[in-house]
Amino acid sequence: MLLKQVTIAVEGDGSQTFNFTYNGMKIVKVQGEGLQPELKRYFYTGNLITKIQHSNFGGPVVEEETFAYNASGQLITYFCKEPTENWAERSDFVYNADNTITRTTYDGSLASQTELESTYVLHLSNGEITEVDVNPGSTNITFTYAYDTKNNPFRNVIGYDKIYFALKTDELRDENVYASGMSHNFLSIRQMDSMGEITRTKTVANTYNSFNFPSTSINTIQWDIMTPPNNSSTVTTQFIYY
């Protein structure tokens, strides 16, 4: 089973639909509908996703993501650039003996990325990210993740399991609600400050089809939790499969 279409409705901000195209089990493109359609094209080397190109209105590439791997097929470098803006970001990944991954991200121009943006320590359990520590020893923001036991919509896409954690750092952003874990789906996400106080949350209510893939997902995001009255918004996602 492969994801065919996603419709994302943001409370108070309309909805947008995306259609997915594959070559076998490899994703080829994601095409948005409407007056301002976004197009994402995926490129493979063997069974590894090595490039994603973003364009608008069928125009030139406005953003390009590339992925480099070691001999074991582990992602070691994620590179994102905006050619027209002379901006680029590079993330280097180190796989630690304690089952964590350290991600170090740098900003800069297309030619050189030397300004340290952030350091992330990703904690994994059974292949899923359960905690992300942002700038440990400095700002110490922590995200924690809880999952269901059902199937992630991208579970059967070849190569997605190698890059999913490169695409997710702050999953409280509304535009990322259709991107989830590796094999399973989010049930909750919490953001905590350096004192351990919860400052933002996302709770997810999913319904599933007969194959245990999500058919709908209602995401409720709350922020400014420590300063009542806190704010919240709801994002509803509908999934259709091949």
Image (cartoon, rainbow, N blue to C red):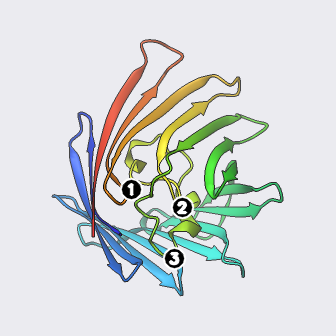
Residue that appears at 53% across and 65% down: 80
Precedes in sequence: disc 2 or disc 3? 3
Return the x and y of residue 22 as percentages of the image width and height.
34, 78
The answer to whether 30 appears left or right of 107 in the picture is: left
How dense is the environment of label 3, judged by Cα within 10 Å: few (below 14), some, or many (20 and up)? many
The answer to whether 209 appears left or right of 138 in the picture is: left
Q: Which amino acid, by three-letter code, is at mark 3?
A: Ile
Q: Which amino acid, by three-letter code, is at mark 1?
A: Asn
Residue that appears at 51% across and 76% down: 49
Which numbered tag is attached to residue 164?
2
Return the x and y of residue 36 as percentages of the image width and height.
21, 59
- Quarter location, residue 115: bottom right
Q: Are circles 1 and 2 on residues that touch, CB within 8 Å? A: no
The answer to whether 239 appears left or right of 160 in the picture is: left
How dense is the environment of label 1, judged by Cα within 10 Å: few (below 14), some, or many (20 and up)? few
Q: Could you say which is closer to the camera, residue 50 or residue 108? A: 50
Q: Which residue is mark 3?
A: 49
- Is 105 placed above or below 204 here? below
Return the x and y of residue 91 as percentages of the image width and height.
65, 61
- Quarter location, residue 55: bottom left
Q: Could you say which is closer to the camera, residue 95 or residue 68? A: 95
Q: Which residue is mark 1?
A: 212
Q: Could you say which is closer to the camera, residue 202 or residue 212? A: 212
Per the image, label 1 sits on a secondary structure element best described as loop
